[in-house]
Amino acid sequence: MSDEDDLDLSTLDDDELVKQMHDDLYDGLKEEIEEGVNILLERGWTPYDVLTQALVEGMRIVGIDFRDGILFVPEVLLAANAMKGGMAILRPLLAETGAPKLGKMVIGTVKGDIHDIGKNLVSMMMEGAGFDVIDIGINNPVENYLAAIEEHEPDILGMSALLTTTMPYMKVVIDTLKEKGMRDDYIVLVGGAPLNEAFGEAIGADAYCRDAAVAVETAKEFMARKHNQL
Ligand code: B1M
């Protein structure tokens, strides 16, 4: 057993614990991440602060070393699994606001893309802000989006893409909506690390959302405009 295994997370102060959680996320230690999340919550941290400062920041560090060839897919998968363990604890807390329902969103990651952490985070934050969210998962061809919007009749269609090779597929979905004369029935919001505002505009989305908090604000703004038009 290494020293690391013996470490009692509850003896660390907040800063040390958050740093340790970044290391534990890097090492894919799901149980330790879950324990760290619980300790921070017990210390009075808000779920949002735990999410952004401990988990999202930890994943940002993982992303840098993945990009630089220091970490590989198996390790990153373990890190993602640990992150999801922490997110599972936070999800009900973020959704627990009791806010009145603001609208409905269907969201999914586009075809060819299996990244889902960012999308899940957006779903959590949208739920927390009072939206009904129907998450159709990863690797979605246009047919899946069409089926989901037909079934659930959302106000908002959200799409996520993390790869430069999959982000153009968002345009396929939007163009299909246009062909079917349905484009203007939905607020289309897009997001994902390789996107930017210009891309969102070029493909005909209503808005590009840099992160989950921006997605919530943007969704609220568009819903307010929609209600004013009715
Ligand atoms: Co992948 N991967 N990955 N990966 N992966 C990236 C995206 C990459 C940038 C890493 C790198 O090289 N630096 C790179 C893409 C390069 C490029 O396209 N230019 C990459 C690559 C290359 C790959 C593979 C091709 C690797 C391989 O197989 N050789 C492969 C592709 C698989 C596929 O999809 N077909 C692959 C696989 C994987 C794993 C499976 C190992 C794992 C995913 C696990 C999972 O998601 N369940 C993984 C991970 C974890 C990453 C990184 C490290 C982290 C992504 C993440 O979860 N970030 C990523 C590096 C990076 O992004 N810097 C990387 C944390 C998350 C909270 O942020 O997803 O950006 P993000 O979401 C944010 C915002 O973008 C926004 O809000 C979120 C919350 O604030 N947002 C939205 C996202 N979606 C939104 C939707 C909205 C609104 C806002 O709708 C309204």
Image: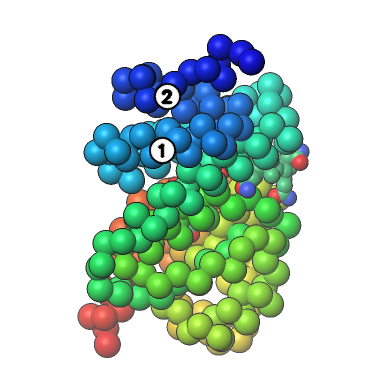
Residue type, numbered disc 1: Val
Nearer mark to the viewer, of 2 and 1:
2
Check disc 2 and report its element: helix, strand or loop.
helix
Q: Position of residue 64 (x, y in %)?
A: 58, 27
Q: Quadrant of the N terminus?
A: top right
Q: Which residue is mark 2?
A: 9
What residue is shown at x 30% (from left), y 75% (from top)?
101
Q: Vertically, is 5 above or below 80?
A: above
Q: Quadrant of residue 35?
A: top left
In the displayed structure image, the side of residue 150 where residue 222 appears, left or right: left
- From this viewpoint, is residue 184 visible? no
Q: Marks 2 and 1, Cα distance to the nearest angstrom?
A: 10 Å
Residue type, numbered disc 2: Leu
What residue is shown at x 53% (from left), y 45% (from top)?
85
Q: Which residue is mark 1?
A: 37
Q: Quadrant of the C terminus?
A: bottom left
Check disc 1 and report its element: helix, strand or loop.
helix
